[in-house]
Image (cartoon, rainbow, N blue to C red):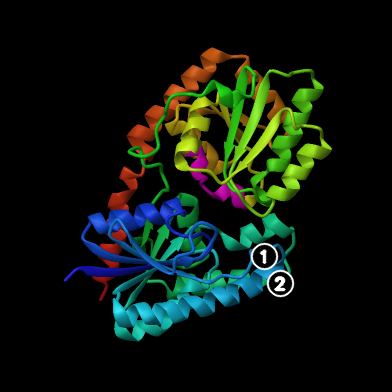
């Protein structure tokens, strides 16, 4: 009999959530029967479908929140639907392991009733929620203390923890009290069979000599306001030979588009929203420099951003702030801004890279080699399998 897995993810639909989708496909290849439960969203509205051997169920979700109270209501609604769907899936398909992917840290409570049937719980630690809350709202109030409590309970209720990097592993040990033998680091590297350079398209430079590319979520902690500030500074200095293209969607997209208008950057910056994988590959292949303007804060210092390794896979030099996990991933594939400089420092580094083509080539080649030899998704699959084997054989 195949080993049966239910993966629950709340913040993104599957297969749009690239990390969860790669995990699901890897588990199918490893002989597991895989079911995924995720929210419905634009473009992903079917209640149930089967893709590449993975059964995908999608539950209703309220409109994306933009306040602490709104997030609380959103999480309550998600918890209700996740529990209802999990009961249905257990009755019809069954599962031996539940993997819960945060945020939020409430999926462990969905898994709790199934413990009496011997079901194991694997916590896939995607985000440090207390630090994420501070990055969004800048305060330690009731909701912050609630997130700290939920994180602690999630660690205690988990049989196995999957950490996205060593910083998250340290949190599981120090804050969660998890036995290191039950923690497995599964990095979110690019799948090089699907993520690779394609033919550049000069039209994507909008008549300019250079293209600066960004891909990621448009939200408060991503630092897109810093990037727009850098673009404004570059324009103020008289440079008109570069264009910025920002790929992705998110709650801050509308306000960022308004900032472009208010700062008169329409001739230098465009936002694509969510686009196809092929269009993304074309933009990144055309870019001369890629940027990761994540704001200097504890959450971003501890977190690994997939876009960095994706830029490296495309052979692109990177500009980012000097943050712990960002430097670990990119190493010599990036230039690093002093965290005190913000927009001015970011502008300086972008211009410097554009004016030093030999450095762009060197950094791009280094990044590609590092991804191929150490950071690609294929190197994480072994630890994913080890996490599941340990969960299934715990006494």
Does any portion of residue 341 appear in the rendered image? Answer: no
| Residue at 82% in and 35% down | 263
Q: Where on the picture, by quarter, is residue 163? A: bottom left
Circles 2 and 1: CB atoms closer than 8 Å: yes
Q: Where on the picture, by quarter, is residue 36? A: bottom left
| Residue at 59% in and 62% down | 129
Front residue of this view, candidates 352 and 322: 352
| Residue at 63% in and 43% down | 294
Q: Residues within 10 Å of mark 2 (few under 14, many from 20)?
A: few
Does 300 appear in magenta?
Answer: yes
Residue 238 pos. (x, y %) = 79, 18
| Quarter of the image that includes the N terminus | bottom left
- Tell me the CA gap for discs 2 and 1: 8 Å
Q: Quick check: 387 left or right of 248?
A: left
Q: Quick check: 221 left or right of 54?
A: right
Does any portion of residue 362 appear in the rendered image? Answer: yes
Q: Where on the picture, by quarter, is residue 368? A: top left
Q: Residues within 10 Å of mark 1 (few under 14, many from 20)?
A: some
- The residue indicated by pointer 1 is 65
Q: Which mark is residue 69?
A: 2
Front residue of this view, candidates 306 and 152: 306
Span shown in magenta: 299-309
Q: Quick check: 297 left or right of 318?
A: right
Does 78 appear in magenta?
Answer: no
Q: Main secondary structure of the magenta part?
A: helix
Q: Secondary structure at mark 1?
A: loop
Vertically, is 294 above or below 45?
above
Vertically, is 35 above or below 243?
below
Residue 79 pos. (x, y %) = 53, 76
């Amino acid at each position: 009999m195949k080993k049966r897995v239910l993966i629950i993810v709340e913040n993104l639909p599957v297969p749009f959530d690239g990390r969860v989708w790669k995990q699901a496909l890897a588990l199918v290849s490893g002989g597991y029967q895989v079911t995924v439960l995720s929210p419905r969203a634009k473009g992903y509205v079917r209640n149930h479908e089967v893709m590449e051997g993975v059964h995908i169920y999608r539950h209703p979700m309220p409109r994306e929140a933009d306040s602490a109270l709104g997030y609380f209501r959103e999480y309550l609604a998600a918890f209700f639907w996740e529990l209802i769907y999990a009961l249905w899936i257990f009755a019809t398909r069954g599962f031996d392991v539940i993997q819960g992917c945060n945020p939020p840290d409430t999926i462990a409570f969905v898994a709790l009733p199934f413990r009496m049937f011997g079901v194991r719980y694997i916590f896939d630690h995607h985000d440090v929620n207390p630090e994420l809350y501070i990055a969004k709202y800048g305060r330690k109030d009731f909701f912050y203390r609630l997130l700290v409590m939920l994180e602690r309970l999630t660690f205690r209720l988990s049989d196995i923890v999957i950490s996205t990097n060593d910083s998250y592993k340290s949190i599981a040990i120090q804050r969660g009290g998890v036995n290191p033998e039950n923690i497995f680091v599964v990095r979110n590297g690019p799948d090089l069979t699907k993520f690779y350079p394609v033919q550049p398209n000069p039209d994507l430079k909008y008549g300019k000599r250079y293209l600066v590319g960004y891909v990621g979520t448009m939200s408060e902690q991503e630092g897109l306001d810093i990037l727009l500030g850098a673009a404004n500074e570059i324009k103020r200095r008289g440079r008109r030979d570069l264009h910025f293209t920002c790929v992705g969607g998110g709650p801050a997209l509308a306000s960022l588009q308004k900032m472009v208008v208010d700062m008169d950057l329409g001739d230098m910056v465009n936002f694509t929203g969510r686009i196809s994988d092929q269009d993304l590959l074309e933009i990144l292949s055309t870019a001369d420099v890629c940027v990761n303007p994540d704001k200097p804060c504890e959450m971003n210092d501890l977190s690994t951003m997939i876009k960095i390794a994706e830029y490296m896979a495309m052979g692109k030099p990177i500009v980012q702030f000097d943050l712990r996990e960002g430097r670990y991933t990119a190493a010599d594939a990036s230039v690093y801004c002093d965290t005190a400089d913000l927009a001015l420092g970011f502008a300086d580094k972008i211009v410097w890279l554009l004016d030093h083509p030999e450095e762009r080539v060197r950094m791009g080649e280094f990044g590609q080699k590092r991804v191929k030899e150490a950071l690609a998704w294929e190197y994480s699959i072994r630890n994913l399998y080890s996490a599941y084997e340990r969960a299934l054989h715990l006494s």
